[in-house]
Amino acid sequence: MHGFRGVSRYRTVWISDTHLGTRGCKADFLLDFLRHTECETLYLVGDIIDGWRLKKSWYWTETQNEVVQEVLKKSRKGCQVIYVPGNHDEVMRDYTNLFFGGVLVKDEVIHQGADGRTYLIIHGDKFDSVVKYAKWLAHLGDWAYTVLLSTNHYFNLVRRWLKLPYWSLSAFLKQKVKNAVEFISHFETAVAHEARERGVDGVVCGHIHHAEMREIDGILYCNDGDWVESCTALVEHADGKLEIVRWTDAPERVAVSSSKRLPAGVGA
């Protein structure tokens, strides 16, 4: 992992599952990451703004607003920003091939790395049978997940008071619960199979909040993780090398979270 001193420069950066508009969003970590990262292309790989949560209750902090402004600022400075929507921000799929503040919306993208390798960029929700065939169950699961994240929040307040680093309870449970492990494995295999069918060398996705980079039957499977649990991103170096960056490795760089909320309709 990097020491995170100064600004890190990459050819490409992928982030997903930021879930702006929710209490679980680690907006401070995300804003810090964006401010200390420069890239030629920034991919927003779905579930950037959580429409499911915002429909139920409005929640938007100043820090979350600053995250959006930071992305738009990167676009104005010449960074190519491509937004590939997911299931929580699926309304954006109605605007495929259109620009918003310099941000291009695409349903999917083929990215060519500096080393010539090609990657399919998708959110990945279409490979989740619950989201695809039982949306009501997906919403129920989303509610349960929100409760778990709330528990995790208070747990980490205690850890911060004890001068301990951030630790994700939900990520830990994913690794230990058999059904969760099997779901992740099946998801990764299905996504890699799709990439193979498309004739590309690899795939970059999000959706399952589990950062990973490994080869599956000759396909390089990459998941950039999330910004509610692990605070991870996938980056491409100038030579085409890919790497997962975990921003919670540098918690001292992050300011105290802003609890001040913005009223509905303000900001993003």
Image (spheres, rainbow, N blue to C red):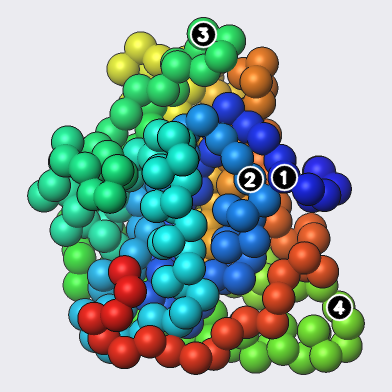
* Residue on which disc 1 sits: 7
Give the CA distance from mark 1 to mark 3: 26 Å
> Which residue lies most toward the front here?
77
Give the CA distance from mark 1 to mark 4: 26 Å
Give the residue drawn at x 26%, y 86%: 264
The kind of secondary structure element at disc 4 is: loop
Give the CA distance from mark 4 to mark 2: 25 Å
Could one spot residue 177 in this view of the protein?
Answer: no
* Residue on which disc 4 sits: 164
Q: Is residue 89 above or below residue 26?
A: above
* Depth check, front residue: 59 or 80: 80
Badge 1 or badge 4: first in the primary sequence: 1
The kind of secondary structure element at disc 3 is: loop
| Residue type, mark 4 in image | Leu
Q: Nearer the viewer, mark 4 or mark 2?
A: 2
Give how far across and how far down residue 36 sits, in percent: 67, 51
Give the residue drawn at x 48%, y 68%: 66
Q: Are marks 2 and 3 in contact (CB under 8 Å)?
A: no
Q: Estimate how packed mark 2 is, as few (under 14), some (14 to 19) or many (20 or more) residues with alpha carbons within 10 Å.
A: some
* Residue on which disc 3 sits: 116
* Residue on which disc 2 sits: 37
Badge 4 or badge 2: first in the primary sequence: 2
Could you tell whether 62 is left or right of 159 in the image?
left
Give the residue drawn at x 71%, y 40%: 8
